[in-house]
Each structure stands twice: as structure tokens, then as C-alpha cells.
Amino acid sequence: MKRRTFLGAISASAAGVLTGGLSKLVAAIPEARASKTGETFLLGGDLLVNRLGFGAMRLTGEGIWGWPPDREGAKKVLRRAVELGVNFIDTADAYGPETDELLIAEALYPYPKGLVIATKGGNTRPGPGQWVPDGRPEYLTQAVDKSLKRLKLERIDLWQLHRIDRKVPVEESLGAIKKAQDAGKIRHVGLSEVTVAEIEQAKKVMPIVSIQNRYNITDRDSEAALNYCEKEKMGFIPWAPIGGGGTRSLSKPGNALEAEAKRHNVSVVQLALAWLLQKSPVMLPIPGTSSLAHLEENMAAQKLQLTAREANAQRPTSN
């Protein structure tokens, strides 16, 4: 796909679709970022990853539970993602649980040189659609070892605390992870769904290289965390980069961005992903899908380009 520009001036009719107008939804991108941003990011200072990655959560059964209905098809998606240039895959021991990590190893082991597999621990799964944090040091120690075995790795490049367990001091949870890192089982550590204050608290225990919070063009509650990551040169991994499932999905028909995307001959998903990639140089979107066609569509978003003039819509007054 040839590079193209696509946002343009926001039309008066589109501007009234959402509360505050579409022009408030599409934030202005500073001049310094408006030219082509880097396609890669040095995660942790030593892992060069392509900024548009792949989130493997959807390669499971309904409710993020069990094996996918089409196991061989899911493996084809993983292999195709790598063929399309993905070298950063995000998963978690809670996806399935366990099946997602096993599937990645089935599809991709022995892993191509330079492939970074990020996983997470600290969320348990009592049943489909249920998530319960467990930050006990003994549980996290065990979780790391089991992820290593399922993924067939000697060291996890990026291990992320899936959620902070409010019943356990984060210093105790991360203390166990620091021991695993010191033992050579983990290369780098990240956090998920945290505030700036929680990031700073965690950094007193050990270095933190990335944050994975919910963030997309319509949901910017984590703007402060993104700004912090940019200032500290930490990776920001927005989960649900295209809204996730259900009513918040940006791919649902009738979405407020749909008309604008059609007017510029791109999909809403491509518009949303391109916006994320140019929003910040530390942004590492991980759109996930179980469909080869959707995967191709997602990856094409990195070819789209905003210009300063086109992106210079009214800056939003709130996230």
C-alpha cells in the first residue's frame, strides 16, 4: 500500500457527531512529530522492536478461555504476523489460561532471531471472563517459571505485572520478580494498568521499562502515564488500541469515526492505529485478531501518514 495522508480538515458535519466534536477527538500532533516518526523503538535500551506489534489475547476461546476454535488457523495468524514484520508479540499466562503461551510456542518455536515475546503474570482465572489479581511473591515466582516452560524460553525478554494486587504491597510482588531477573530468568520488567504514582513507586524496587494501559483514540484516561513514559523514554503499550470488544470497539458499524475514515479511503481501525503511532514515539500498539484479513488490515496502518496540517485539529480540552 502506498503511503497516503488522510485526516484533512474536520468537516462541520463530522465534528458534531461526538460530544465536543470529532475535532476534539483527533488531538493535534506537535510539528516535531508530524513528519514520519520512527518505525522502531529500543525497548529497555537494548531490544529493537517494530512499533506496531501483535497482541495474542484473541487467539483463545470465548471469554479468553481455552483453546481457540480454529487452533491451526490461530497458528497461521501468528506466523503471518511475523512475515508481515511483527517482532513484538504480547501475551500473558492468564490468556486461556496458559493456552496462549503454548500456542505461540507451537506456532513459532524455534523463534526467529530478534523476535521479542512479552508475557504477563499476576492475574488468575477462576473461569471464562473472570480475572482475579494474585501478587503473592510465591505465586509470581512460580508464574515466571511456568511461563518460561510453556514458551520454551531460557529468559523472558519482557515480563509484565498484569495487575497490582491490592492485598499485597507492590514492593513484595516486585521483590520476587527482581530475584527472577537477578537469576537471569527475566530481561526487562513492565507494569500494566498503573498510575504515574504507582510507576514511581515500582521504580524504587527495580527498573521499569514499559507500561501497558488501556488507551486509544477515544479512550485517553492514561494520558498522564503516556506523557510520563515519553519523558522517561519508556515504552507505552496501549491495550485495546482499537477499542477492544463489545460496545467500545472502534470497528463496530456506525462508529463516529466511520464517515471520516471512509472519506479518506481507509478503515476506522487503520485511522486509529496510525493516530496512535504518530501520537508518541514511545507508543507500541499491539492490535490483536484471530483473522488473517484483519491482521493484514491492521499492519497496513503503519503505511499511513498524518501531516502537521492535516492533524492540526483543535486540541482536546479533556481526555
Image (tube, rainbow, N blue to C red):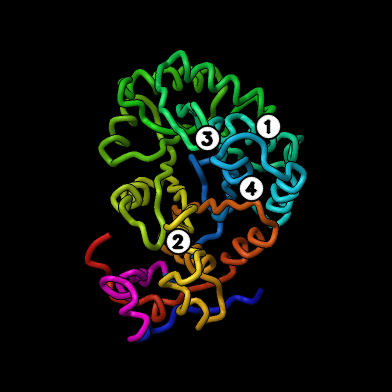
Q: Distance between the residues labelled 1 and 3?
A: 18 Å
Q: Pointer 3: what residue? A: 128
Q: Pointer 1: what residue? A: 102
Q: Contact, CB < 8 Å: mark 4 with mark 2? A: no
Q: In this view, does 206 lie above or below 50?
A: above
Mark 3: few, some, or many residues within 10 Å (few <14, many ≥20)?
Answer: some
Residue 306 on image: x %, y %? 47, 74
Circle nearer the N terminus (4, 2): 4
Front label number (1 vs 2):
1
- The amino acid type found where label 2 is placed reads Leu
Q: How far apart are marks 4 and 2 (CA)?
A: 18 Å
Q: Pointer 2: what residue? A: 276
**Residue visible at 47% across and 20% down in the picture:** 140
**Residue visible at 36% across and 57% down in the picture:** 219
Q: Pointer 4: what residue? A: 87
Residue 208 found in image quarter: top left
Closer-to-camera residue (259/223): 259
Magenta stretch: give its range.
Answer: 12-33
**Residue visible at 61% across and 52% down in the picture:** 289
Disc 4 element: loop
Q: Distance between the residues labelled 3 and 4?
A: 29 Å
Residue 294 found in image quarter: bottom right
- The amino acid type found where label 4 is placed reads Asn
Circle nearer the N terminus (3, 2): 3
Disc 2 element: helix
Q: Contact, CB < 8 Å: mark 1 with mark 4? A: no
**Horizontal relation, residue 47 to residue 82: left or right:** left
Mark 1: few, some, or many residues within 10 Å (few <14, many ≥20)?
Answer: some
